[in-house]
Structure formats: structure tokens, C-alpha cells
Image: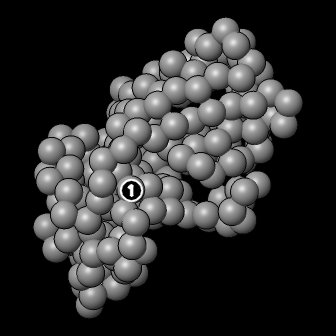
Amino acid sequence: MPLAFESASHGAVAFGFFNIDSDMLLLEQEFFFADDFCDGIVRLTEAEEDDAAVGWPGYRIEDRAEVGDLMGAIHGVRFTGFIGATYERFPFPERREDFVQKPEGAENRDLFAQMIEPFAAQRTVRLDCERAGETATVAGYRFDRAEFHRLLDYVWLGGYPRWRDGVRPDCVERMAAAAIGSGHWLFEQIELSR
């Protein structure tokens, strides 16, 4: 489930996985797949410039109502917008122990891409970092370095409820190794949860 993160530009914003059967992430009204996000992070770790930018494919749902009602969809009572469409296809599990983020979620990428098309416009999601302010801006949402590290830690953990059996997709492992081993200022002092 998405959690609240404190942005320097928009206050508290929602970020995270929203359906355990997909590796798609949301950041408010922006949607993108975890493998693209992780690959973007890896490219940024290799940047030689202090102020660097990377991008990856994503989607934006302009009308907040078209995003959908996550809690209504989880409880099976209100299937609106894109999130409602995902839960009609992949319902919330009946058993609590089955509520785990599936590391094979990328296998459903094409289905989730088809489901989001009626609601969203495709766009490039940009990640810009600025050394002077020690910030990272993802899709227009600016985070200080510590909060940006929390976003990466969320993906590393598999959000809430966490990766099933602690098994992470390869893209997440690559992202973590690159971030920890990076000499770029944005990744200084990064710590990922155990």
C-alpha cells in the first residue's frame, strides 16, 4: 500500500505499490513501473554531474477521481477509476497471510499498462537532483535527500506489506547495490532496512 512521504514542494504525498499483483508504483497522480524506476536510479548513481537528471516511461492521470478509491477497492465495495479496474481483475486477497507484495509482479506489466490507458496519458517521468538544495525531484515532487532515501527504502522493502518471503525482484537488488556503492552526493549516507 502507498504510504505518506513528506515532500518539500507539496507536503505529504502518497507513494508506493497499490496492488500486490503488480510492480507498478504511484506517486500521487503519477504511475510507473518499479523496474523503470529502479533502472532510472541506477543511471543516476552513475552520473558524474552534481546536478543530474534521468527519465523513464510513465503515466499521469489528470483527474484525481479517475485514480480511483484504493480503500473501497481493497474492501471490494467501490471499483472506480484505474485502481478500481486493477482490483476488479486482481482482488485483494481473502486471507491476511496472502497480503504480500509479489516479486513476480512485473509479469503483469502488459495487463496493467492496458488497464491504465483509458485513464492516463503516457509521459516521461523525470528525476532531477540539485546539489545546492540537496534535493531530488521526482515527477515534479521535490524531496530532501533523507526523504528521497526513504522512497528507495520503501521500494527495497516491498512497501507495506513487504516482498513475499523477503524475495526482491532483480531490478530492486540492482538499484540497492548501485545506490549503496555510488559516489554521487545524492546517495551519501543511504541506509536500506534489513
- Identify residue type, mark 1: Arg
- Picture residue at 27% right of the left edge, 88% below the top: 78
Towards the viewer: 174 or 46: 46
Query: Going by the image, does 184 lie left or right of 140?
Result: right
83 versus 19 height, above or below:
below
Indicate the quadrant containing the N terminus: top left, top right, bottom left or bottom right. bottom left
Q: Position of residue 188 (x, y in %)?
A: 77, 24
Its colouring scheme is one colour
Residue at 71%, 47% in the rendered image: 143
Asked if 71 appears above or below 112 in the picture, the reply is: below
Q: Is residue 133 above or below residue 53?
A: below
* SS under mark 1: strand
Q: Nearer the viewer, residue 174 or 38?
A: 38
Residue 44, given in percent of the width and then of the height, sits at 57, 21
Q: In the orientation shown, which residue stands out farthest toward the top?
A: 48
Q: Position of residue 92 (x, y in %)?
A: 27, 72
Horizontally, residue 78 falls left or right of residue 188, namely left
Left or right: 114 as drawn, with respect to 83: left
Reading the image, the residue beneath label 1 is: 60
**Alpha-carbon neighbours of circle 1 within 10 Å: few (<14), some, or many (≥20)?**
many
Q: Quadrant of residue 69?
A: bottom left
Where does the image place residue 71, in percent across and percent down from the top left? Answer: 40, 81
Task: Judge whether residue 93 can be spotted in this image.
Answer: no
